[in-house]
Amino acid sequence: MADIIVSDLVKTHPGGRRPATDHISLHIPDGEFLVLVGPSGCGKTTLLRMVAGLETPDAGTIHIRGRDVTHLSARQRNVSMVFQSYAIFPHMRVRANIGFGLMLHKVPKDEINRRVARAAELLNLTDVLDRHPAQLSGGQRQRVAVARAIAVDADVLLMDEPLSNLDALLRLQFRSELKKIVNQLGTTTIYVTHDQAEAMSLGDRVAVLRDGRIAQIGPPIEVYDRPADQFVGGFLGSPPMNFLPATVESGAGQARVLVGTQRLAAPGQLTGFAGRPVSVGIRAENINVSDTARDGALAAQVEVVEPTGSAVLLTVQLDGIQLKVQTPPSFATQPGKPVWLTIDPKHMRFYDPDTALALEVAA
Amino acid sequence: MTPADTPAPHKPARAGRGRGARWRAVGVQLACLAVTAFMFAPVYLVALAALSTPESLNRFPLSLLPTDVSVETMASFLTMGGVLPAFVNSLIVGVGTLVLSVLIGLPAGYALARYVFAGRDAYQLFMLLTRALPIVVLSVPLAQLFLTTGLYDTTYAVILLHTALALPTTVLITSAVFVGVPRDQEEAAQIFGATPVQAFVRVVLPQALPGIAAAGLFTFVTSWNEVLGAAILTLDRRTLPAQVLSTLGASPLTYRFAGGFALIVPALVFVALMRKYLLSMWGTTLR
């Protein structure tokens, strides 16, 4: 049961104006893969380094496996880590790199050999075990860093943007491999990234951080589908969620929102907000586009057409508001042409335009 | 010097301004040759005189080519009274200075490279001030101090002086070397179970060793060549340069050339061996 409990963790870097982590509390159950995601400077790496024991919090506690490790040094915490820079040792052969932790823990030689061989096999490094890191490609060095981290029997596996130095193709390939390996191990894992696609695809749960606080935590699909505030909606997903300034109107038990000069059917629960301004959040793929006028559809004009192969991304102008819309690749249109947009009310999310927080509208 | 610091090699002249660029390249090459010749000429002449027969020195005109090669001059120099003990003293002082300055300078360099502490910049500046003082100014009070403590005229006295002189460079060079080993690697070692000392010994030290060796040899040569302080602080236990200096006025020409040659050779060997490390070292220090 290697669960991690982080409570009220505060850390301000020397010379920093505001805290890197601001009273963060988290519970990571045994075996969970938690992804910390957020823009640079949001405190995700600081949080990870505090769990690793590489930095000391100003206040708060960290428990791993029920043991208070807040003031223990890194080597006493039984954690394992993959660094962004890989941090493999250039003066040691791959074999010694992978076996480094086992060697320090005085594991018998044949046991080290066995476990190094297994880790190397998992990561396709068997052929390069006797090389030095300088003779490896970037992708192989990355694999050595991961192999070194999984060769030891750690309670917790920590990864700090491990894929950010790989090129796009390799990153995609290794992402799924990494997911498979970590699944097999079943080790409690904290994974830091600034890449929202990585966060979505890898995590059992995703914690979106902003300014040292957790903006939202939950399963990826939930966080993607129901962002707790506009920041999360804008950060997760590519393209980011659209936000339309609108005003709620109600009449005859039906709620509608006024967007620009046009009206759009909204979920009935919104009637309570009648007369108030709201921000309507809608994902690009949840907007249906047609090139013929339809009743209840919003008229808009195409500005940019970006085919991505699997879909076409349109930038459209709706009464002065810019929207990103995703259409099937078969949809043919050109800049300047009119289109009509329909949105299923169940895909709409509503935010307070002042606080940017989600409104309690059960849809 | 890192590759980025070296001036870009002159590319084949492009059409248009080809002539000017080519003449400039020729000029740079000629200037390099002139400077090299200027530096090398005395070394060559000393070596020539030291490795020729004593008679050929008095011949006129002096032959500029090694026509009379012999070890006679060197042999008579080395067997002369006081030379061999001075040679041994120089070795003791050189090695002692090397060991002491690395022992003290290494931790200081590490601290400068890894930690931000109050007064860090002032400390760095302060260290360079030792070099700003002329050696004579340092040596006379030291001689006084050593006389009262009984250290005067011992190799220890010279070792202490040379260590003080060498420390600033040792500290700055080793700190540049340690900066070159990413901190991540030390952290990784600690994550995987190493104590801070183990992380240093197993991960940092092996990578820093060439640079430390270069710093050490640099110290050795500095000590080997230092004459003024050594001459002031000793009477009987002279180091080789001090010995040569003190007998210079009363010695024949051959002795002077042989002494000069004996002093030049270790420095040249050092530069030849350590050229690669010295370049990378200064490159990082000057960054």
Image (cartoon, coloured by chain):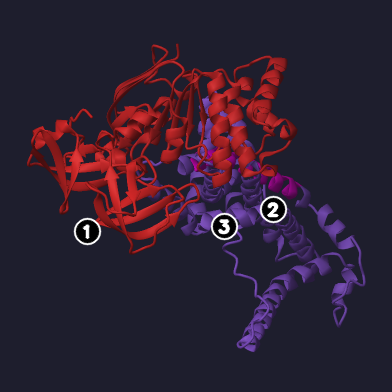
Chain colours: A red, B purple
Q: Is residue A347 left or right of residue A145?
A: left
In magenta, the rendered stretch is B85-109
Which residue type carries mark 1?
Gly
Which residue type carries mark 2?
Met
Give the number of the disc on residue B274: 2
Picture quadrant of residue A145:
top right
Q: Is residue A159 left or right of residue B76?
A: left
* Residue B154 showing in the rendered view: no
Give the number of the disc on residue A320: 1
> SS class of the residue under badge 3?
helix
> SS class of the residue under badge 2?
helix
Image quarter (top left, top right, bottom left or bottom right) of the N terminus of chain B:
bottom right
In space, the residues marked 1 and 2 are separated at their CA atoms by 69 Å
Picture residue at 46% right of the left edge, 33% below the top: A201
Picture residue at 86% right of the left edge, 64% below the top: B51
Q: Percent x, y for residue A56?
A: 36, 28
Vertical relation: A116 (above or below) A289: above
In space, the residues marked 1 and 3 are separated at their CA atoms by 56 Å
The local crowd at label 1, few if under 14, some if 14 to 19, many if 20 or more residues have their Cα within 10 Å, is: few
Marks 1 and 3 close (CB-CB < 8 Å): no
Residue linked to disc 3: B283
Picture residue at 63% right of the left edge, 55% below the top: B278
Which residue type carries mark 3?
Gly
> SS class of the residue under badge 1?
loop
Residue B35 versus residue B157: which sits nearer the camera? B35
